[in-house]
Image (cartoon, rainbow, N blue to C red):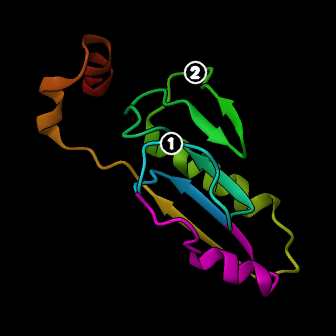
Amino acid sequence: MVSEGTVFFPKYLQEEVYQTGFIGKWHIGEHSDKPRDGFDYWASFQGQGRYWNSVFNVNGTKEKPTDSIYVTDAITDFALDFLDNRNQENPFSFTSVIKQFMPSLLLHLDTKENKQMQT
């Protein structure tokens, strides 16, 4: 758990007019996908998420994919959204953390995900 009162570095950047974003897997203290203080743009999922069709919390709103999408592709799309829609006059900082694929996990994926991974 993160200690109460902890300030993450993006909060300091915001004080200097930086636009800040976090996109991807958050693993600091808890499995919640709630937006964290200090980020103007937030796109994350609960816990480990899923390799396919992860539900993202985007700035406080749950977004479920309408099409089959691999999690790294979704993270990339959210990162591009942040970069394309930010105020171009201000500096920015964003952190993007991908969910790493490990082939040994195929043994543990449900059947539908396993078939999608192999195509």
- Magenta segment: 1-20
| 9 lies above or below 29 | below
Count of picture labels: 2
- Residue identifier under label 1: 32
Let me know if residue 97 is in the magenta part. no
Query: Which numbered tag is attached to residue 67?
Result: 2
Is residue 101 rendered to the left or right of residue 86?
left
Across and down, in percent, residue 67 comes to 57, 21
Q: Using the image as rendered, state which of residue 1 and residue 13 is in the foreground.
A: 1
Q: Using the image as rendered, state which of residue 101 and residue 7 is in the foreground.
A: 7
| Eye-nearest disc, 1 or 2 | 1
- The amino acid type, in three-letter code, at marker 1 is Ser
Across and down, in percent, residue 94 comes to 61, 69
Residue at figure coordinates x 58%, y 79% from the top left = 9
Q: Dot 1 lies on which element?
A: loop
Is residue 67 rendered to the left or right of residue 102?
right
Residue at figure coordinates x 40%, y 54% from the top left = 27
Q: Using the image as rendered, state which of residue 6 and residue 74 is in the foreground.
A: 6
State which tag comes first along the sequence, 1 or 2: 1
Q: Residues within 10 Å of mark 1 (few under 14, many from 20)?
A: some
Across and down, in percent, residue 84 comes to 77, 60
Residue at figure coordinates x 75%, y 62% from the top left = 40
Across and down, in percent, residue 62 comes to 66, 31
- The amino acid type, in three-letter code, at marker 2 is Asp
Most distant residue in the front direction? 4
